[in-house]
Image (tube, helix red, strand yellow):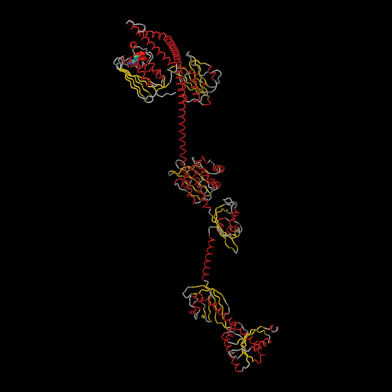
Amino acid sequence: MSNVNEAGIPLRVLIVEDMEDDVILIAQELRRGGYNPTLNRVDTLEAFHTALTEQIWDVIIADYSMPHFSALDALKLLQESGLDVPFIVVSGTIGEEIAVKMMKAGAHDYVMKGSLARLVPAVRRELREAEVRRARRHAEEEIRQLKEFNESIVQNMSEGITIEDANGFFTFLNPAAAEMLGWEPDELVGQHWTVVVPTDQQPIVRAADERRMRGEADRYELELVRKDGTRISVLISGRPRFEAGRFVGTLAVFTDITERKRSEEALRESEEKYRRLFRTARDAIFLMVGDRFVDCNPATETMFACSRNDIIGHTPYEFSPPIQPDGRDSREKALEKINAALAGQYMTFEWVHRRLDGTPFDVEVSLNRLRLGGKWGVLAVVRDVSRRKRAERLLQALNRAALAMEQALTLDEIFAAAARELKELGIFCMVFPTDESRSRLFTRYLCYDPQLLRTVEKLAGYRHEDFSFAVEASDVYREIVQKRRTVFVRNVTGEQILPPVARKFAKQIVRMLAASRAIGAPLVVEDEAIGVLMVLADDLTEEDVPAVTAFAHQMAAAWRKAQLFEQAQQEIAERERVEETLRRRNRELTTLYEIDRDISATLELPVVLERIATHAKDLLGADESEVYLLQPDGQTLRAIVALGPYAEKIKATSLRLGEGIVGYVAQSGVAEVVERAESDPRSVQIPGTPKESHALICVPLISKGEIMGVMSLSRSNEHGSFDQQALDFLVGLSRQAAIAIENARLFAAEQQRSAELLRALEQLKELDRLKGEFIQNVSHELRTPLAIARGYAELLDSGALGELQPQQQESVAIIARRMRMLTKLMDDFNSILEIESQATKREQVDLADMVHNTLADFKIAMEQGGLTLVAQVAQGLPPVCGDPIHLRRVLDNLLGNARKFTPAGGCISLRLVQEGENLVLKVADTGIGIPEDQLGRIFERFYQVDGSMSRRYGGAGLGLALVKEIVEEHGGTVSVESEVGRGSTFTVTLPVSCEE
Ligand code: ADP
């Protein structure tokens, strides 16, 4: 294959041929004709079928006659396959007949093998024709598809489509149209349009029809009636149909706009509503772009007291005070809120606005963003809440005032508390108390700047505190006081609320007081108006009446409380006065008592009198105080005491009885108060003292009817005179002074006596001492010779110096016994002196042991005397603490006495036991006993009941004295019980504990 050939038009050729050579020929021929054929030869029906289905062919060239397969079969198969490929029959032997047959069968051409030159033009032509056929087929397909598509649109679109003929009968309705009208599509075909158009709408359709017949398309809204009778609104586009210039009917497309109409209607209604709201709202409504007002409603003008023009183009903060109550800058805060609203937040907040004239008022603002001509704007709704706020503040202020009033104790404080709180709110108040008869009012409490008040007073011509007026003079006050009703005065003219005298200037005064409205409320206590509370302010309303009434109740209660308190105060003051008198009386009594005590404590007359004079001076507030005493001559008076600046001069001067006022009182004995002593004719000038105006009080000192002197007090008249009370007090004092003088005299006498006694006592003591000394000396001197004499006497008595004659024997025995007695006497003397003069020994003494020893010693003597001795000593007794020699003496003396004073046949018993902290020793006998009147004396030294007895029994009356002194020295006691003729019992107690 040459390159030239290869550069030909590609041609895919399917050859149905059994002869390869023929194929080559055909290929050559085609190449010569300018093609670059790709040839595929098949010679069976199967291969042909496969080739058809697997590849695309531009042309099929088929041999007419083959052994197994004919061109006719191939053509049939091709036709069955539906492919439109040019089919050219090539044959060497084809006749006219066969050619016709093949052409009829559908072959596109036939070429004789002998004239292959015809092949290329035939191929070319057939290809072209096949192309045309394809194009047509394609167009047809497109048209078909388009038709289908249109149909499906018409069938499926939501708009309704109807077609009417020239007479107005429906020829077509799409499903949407039928559905909108509530019919089946077929039901309406053939019906006239008036079936679906209600009578009232038909003129619209007719008008449209006329336009359409003139060839105009149009669009209009219409109401249609559905099969069920309900109506729908539709928007119709109608288009006339013409065929060959003749009007043949209408194509109408319509959409259901019922919903839209409905919402449009609703919108329209609501818009209207909003417009009305905007116009009639009581809240101010603004539209703002940025921070500027672009529109506002009529309420705005009222609220801000200005015209629309004053507002539009301005900003909200121009209608605000510079600073909000929270301390924030108005502009800054407003911008912040507006920006937040613009960002889509719904803002509500409280705000203080200002009217054009500058008066501030409280509002609640809500800001909402909204679209204004494609831009975001802000809708501001401003509600005036100043009334509510003020009512709130009023209530709060009233509550605060009520609290303050609770604390207040006086009427002034109550008024001040109320006025202060009310003034904070720009409310002025006055309180007019009523008189007892509730017929007059006093203009006492007015809460106004004092300067303003003075001006008003000048104008009215009276001072408000001094003024009262009749309740009857004004209807307002009559209503308040008599009916006890709260009254609201809408337009204060002055005539209503000012006292008549001020009415001439009512206008001016009211202007000054700057209040156009007032509320007057009665202060009611126990059903009576005790006063009127009048509050004044420009912005009071009827709504404030209950609050003011309630407040007046609280004020009345506080008022009442304060009145009670004032009464109580007065009572307290009265009581205090009484108490002061009592205190003074008490002071005087105390003074008298102290003086009394001084008199008892100090018996020195000058000291006592000076104290009395001092007390009197201090207590009565005197400048000078003197006590004069009548001298022993009974004629001269001398100041024993003088207090004050001229004391020395006064002391140095003496007065005669009857001289001066003092001398006069000393003579008359009558107390006196002299108011102006310096001008009294009796007065004498004491040298060296000034002649001053002074009051004098002189009281005589009288004891047992005898004048002893005078007490006087003086005081400069600058300090006032002395009253009766002072005189009474001084008279009382003078009595005590007199007692003191008397006491002092007695005391002096007494002192003299006791000095004498003391001297006697001293002498006695000295005698006693000498006696002791003497006894000691004597006993000492006697002891040795006595011992020697006693020794010899006993020696003689024992017979050691030779047998004695019975008479001698007796005498010697007497001598010996007497010697023993003398020795004992000496011993007793010594013991007593020892106890008196020196400290006794202290050691543990087993008293039980000592008792046993003593009993043993006494045993024989008792038996000889025919006496029974009974002893009872408790076991395990504790020791006592003391001097064993002395304690032994106690036992000896008690047992000795018992033996001595008990006749033969008697019984002596001894008992030693412990009782608590003591050992108790009892020595009892059945002897002669001791007379009762002597019992107290037997423990005295040298005392004996009966001297003769003692001579009989021996003893010097020292034994029991010694017992007593020893026992007491040991911290114990001794006592005796006795009956004459029956015996005696001596009881000794000694403490067991030994503290050393
Ligand atoms: P005298 O050494 O005289 O006994 P006392 O002081 O011992 O002295 O006694 C004083 C007086 O108490 C005795 O003279 C006696 O009269 C009386 N007297 C003492 N003891 C007894 C007693 N047990 N019975 C009776 N009289 C007694």
- Residue 553: give x, y in percent of width and height: 46, 46
- Residue 5: give x, y in percent of width and height: 69, 84
> Looking at the rendering, in which quadrant would you find the N terminus?
bottom right
- Residue 931: give x, y in percent of width and height: 32, 16
- Residue 200: give x, y in percent of width and height: 50, 74
Give the left or right position of residue 96, taking residue 888 as reference: right
The picture quadrant for ligand 1 comes to top left
Instruction: Say if 146 sits above or below 842 in the image.
Output: below
Can residue 686 be seen by looking at this rendering?
Answer: yes
* Nearer to the camera, 415 or 644: 644
* Nearer to the camera, 241 or 521: 241
* Residue 813 found in image quarter: top left
* Nearer to the camera, 281 or 117: 117
Instruction: Say if 979 sits above or below 512 in the image.
Output: above
Residue at the far left: name it: 905
> Looking at the rendering, in which quadrant would you find the C terminus?
top left
* Residue 760 found in image quarter: top left
* Nearer to the camera, 328 or 603: 603
Can residue 934 be seen by looking at this rendering?
Answer: no
